[in-house]
Amino acid sequence: MYALYRVSQGLDAFTSKVGKVFAWATVPLMLVIIYDVFTRNVLSSMIRAGLISDTTASSLTFMTSTKLQEMEWHLHGVLLLMTFGLAYMKDAHVRIELVRDKMRTRTRLWVELFGILLFLLPYCWIIMWFGWDFAMRSFDNGEVSAALTGLSHRWIIKSFVGLGFLMLFIAALSQLLRTLVGLFGPTDLRDLAGRFVNPQLDNGVQSKAD
């Protein structure tokens, strides 16, 4: 059980690093939005007011508004997909708290175990399987944006569907191992393993699982 817990910690560390790296996509996302608003609204107003010429405005615009808007949802998609695993690991996803908060820690662990085995892992596997085909068909067909002035290489953003659910799959495996430790491990590991389903354990509240 100690080995399972160490493996879980290693998977958590990997998921956390990947999630935090891709969380930085927030910065270019904000910059693209600001630049898009600037070129579409501010420059247009300055042209109408006669403050700058069309030539000057064109020199300040290196991407069309269509490309910028597509880049926005591409970056937003990458940010969302690649932090799924981190959100699950941090227990930041949506749960039915009204029901869950009334459960004992051990009951929560059993619910988590069956939820991971019956729903989360199979669902992630299906999305990864079809996500790979989704991206490869896009790559083979040389898919580009439906807009004439949109972005090319559509397979890049589509590949993040499978990658994002791969990270969630890894996080689910980590939590599966931790759940097994919480249910069947030695007493000194149970509270450590149970913290992700019962945050009260972090505040020194005695677990009711024993």
Image: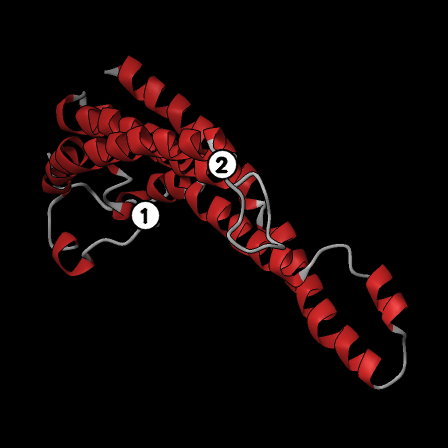
Q: Position of residue 99 (x, y in %)?
A: 12, 56
Question: What kind of element bears circle 2?
Answer: helix
Closest to the observer, 144 or 88: 144
Query: Is residue 103 toward the left or the right of residue 26 in the image?
Result: left
On the question of residue 193 being in view, the answer is no
Residue drawn at point x = 55 percent, y = 49 percent: 75
Q: Position of residue 1 (x, y in %)?
A: 23, 16
What's the coloring here? secondary structure
Residue drawn at point x = 35 percent, y = 30 percent: 133
Screen quadrant of the C terminus = top left
Question: What kind of element bears circle 1?
Answer: helix
Nearer mark to the viewer, of 1 and 2:
2
Q: Which residue position is annotated with label 1?
A: 203
The CA distance from mark 1 to mark 2 is 46 Å
Circles 1 and 2: CB atoms closer than 8 Å: no
On the question of residue 198 being in view, the answer is yes
Q: Where is residue 87 in the image (x, y as percent from the top left)?
A: 38, 44
Q: Position of residue 76 (x, y in %)?
A: 51, 52
Q: Which one is earlier in the sequence, the residue at label 1 or at label 2?
A: 2
Question: Residue 45's quadrant in the figure?
Answer: bottom right
Q: In the rendered structure, find residue 155 and report the number of the disc placed on it.
A: 2
Q: Does residue 66 lie above or below 109 as drawn? A: below
Closest to the observer, 66 or 163: 66
Residue drawn at point x = 40 percent, y = 29 percent: 12
Specify the farthest residue to the bottom. Answer: 49
Query: Is residue 203 toward the left or the right of residue 164 in the image?
Result: left
Q: Callout 1, which amino acid?
A: Asn
Mark 1 Cα shell of 10 Å, populated few (<14), some (14-19), many (≥20):
few
Question: Residue 167's quadrant in the figure?
Answer: top left
Q: Callout 2, which amino acid?
A: Trp
Q: Does residue 27 lie above or below 143 as drawn? A: below
